Image (cartoon, rainbow, N blue to C red):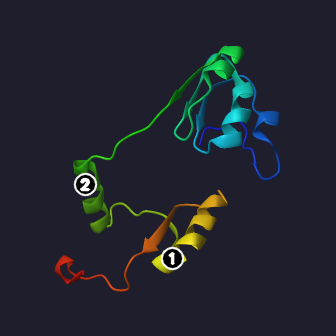
């Protein structure tokens, strides 16, 4: 996919390998964001979709930082739904849990090793909206 070096994060800290990068896209936050400041070159940027980069730390490293957030739009969600129904888009579902196991589902997400989405089943059988109570 164009990477010069692949890093197995379970064996190697990325900050021990990555140096002077132009951009860090932080999708994890917490300590990953903290460890990212030192790998970005001067005038580079950290873009986080999780946490707000710390202004003081950014300034100390001579880099920029932004948080990128979005709000879902009904039209886009409807189009995605149509694509899924037409089997043109297939979401990756890691695991499905019944609503009674919401704590276990959250524990799975907390491992930060989930590939795809976790789905909570809120009822046993799909049915028409009018059948809901």
Q: Mark 1: few, some, or many residues within 10 Å (few <14, many ≥20)?
A: some
Point out residue 48 in the picture as x, y percentages from the top left corner: 55, 35
Instruction: State the residue at coordinates (78%, 34%).
Output: 15
Mark 1 residue element? strand
Q: Residue shown at 22%/49% (left/top)?
A: 75
- Residue drawn 46% across and 76% down? 99
**From the image, which quarter does the C terminus lie in?**
bottom left
Q: Would you name the residue on which mark 1 appears?
A: 97
Figure quadrant of residue 55: top right
The quarter of the displayed image where residue 80 is located:
bottom left
Q: Is residue 126 left or right of residue 114?
A: left
Which x, y percent locates residue 50?
A: 55, 41
Which badge, 1 or 2, comes first in the chain's sequence? 2
Residue 103: % across, % down: 57, 71
Q: 85 or 71, which is in the foreground? A: 71
Residue 79 drawn above or below residue 35: below
| Rendered view: 38 above or below 87 | above
Q: Which residue is identified by label 2? A: 79
Image quadrant in which the N terminus is located:
top right
């Amino acid at each position: 996919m164009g990477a010069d070096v692949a890093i197995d994060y379970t064996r190697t800290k990325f900050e021990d390998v990555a140096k002077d990068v132009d951009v860090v896209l932080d999708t994890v936050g917490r300590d990953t964001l903290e460890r990212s400041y030192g790998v970005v070159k001067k005038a580079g940027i950290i873009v986080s979709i999780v946490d707000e980069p710390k202004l003081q730390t950014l300034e100390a490293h001579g880099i920029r930082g932004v948080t990128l957030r979005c709000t879902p739009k009904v039209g886009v969600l409807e189009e995605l739904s149509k694509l899924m129904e037409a089997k043109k888009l297939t979401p990756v579902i890691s695991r499905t849990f019944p609503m009674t196991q919401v704590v276990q589902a959250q524990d799975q997400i907390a491992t930060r090793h989930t590939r795809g989405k976790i789905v909570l089943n809120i009822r046993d059988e799909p049915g028409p909206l009018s059948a809901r109570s």
